[in-house]
Amino acid sequence: MAFFEVLFPTDISYGSSGGPGFLTRMVSTQAGFEYRSAAWERQRATWNAAHGLKTPTNYKALIAFFYTVGMGKLNGFRWKDWLDYLDDGFGTIQYNSSGFLQLAKTYTSIAPVTGSVQPTFTRWIDKPVPGTLTLPAGVTCDYTSGLVFGTAAPNQTWTGQFHVPVRFDIDHLDMSIDQPWGATGADVAPSWRNIPIVELKIPPPVPNRGRVSQTVIETLRTSSFTPGPGHVSQTVIECLRTSAHS
């Protein structure tokens, strides 16, 4: 199992159907009342790439991608969701649940009919697109995780594009040859009606060894430092203090 920082062919994803989803547990009583609870904290989108296949070139590219990158459900890769790949003016920097600063996009509903509570949803950006981001001065970004460093602070804004981490949701290609393609019939037009793609729910990232300096590690091991809100979690600190991490 691996994740490849490779983008699924955009000329195929452009015609795909799908979008974000959630999992809701629901119990209905005999009286008709409902009790609902969220099983997922974060969204998980699905798409079907079969709708984007238009030419033999598309099919050949997709077959090669299936062989070399996806290998069925095994490996993850990047996906461009054409309906939602820009910050749209809602890009912010926030602390993730691991206590590290990460790119986020905040969705806000329309104004409520009554009251002042306006629902919002924070989406973590795991795969920003290199070369498209505009970040505050002194801020750098890890494009494989969405984590930010340098002078980053909560509620700073960013602009740019992002991808979604996904995988194929099939292990077997079920294709058929329906008809010749083109005036001479030299090529064929295969039919591949179901190519499900599912978003990977990646745990909140933490900096790798290259991001946490040896000086910081030694300080955490030997000091009585207690993290404040949004700093490295106490669990991480204890692991660093007691482990042989280097």
Image (cartoon, rainbow, N blue to C red):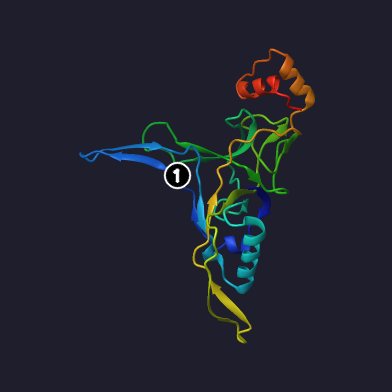
User: Residue 91: where, in percent of width, then height?
Assistant: 60, 40
Q: How many marks?
A: 1
2 relative to 102, above or below = below
Q: Nearer the viewer, residue 136 or 29?
A: 29
Q: Nearer the viewer, residue 80 or 109?
A: 80
The residue positioned 59% from the left and 43% from the top of the image is: 89
Q: Nearer the viewer, residue 224 or 136?
A: 224
User: Residue 103: where, in percent of width, then height?
Assistant: 63, 38
Q: Residue furthest right?
A: 215
Q: Residue furthest top?
A: 224
Q: Quadrant of residue 82?
A: bottom right
Q: Quadrant of residue 126?
A: top right
User: Residue 46: where, in percent of width, then height?
Assistant: 50, 52
The residue positioned 61% from the left and 32% from the top of the image is: 155
Q: Quadrant of the C terminus?
A: top right
179 relative to 1, above or below = below
The residue positioned 72% from the left and 18% from the top of the image is: 221
Q: Residue furthest bottom?
A: 184
Identify the residue under disc 1. 22
Asked whether, in this view, residue 241 is left or right of residue 107, the answer is right
The residue positioned 62% from the left and 27% from the top of the image is: 99
Helix, strand or loop under label 1:
loop
| Amino acid of disc 1 | Phe
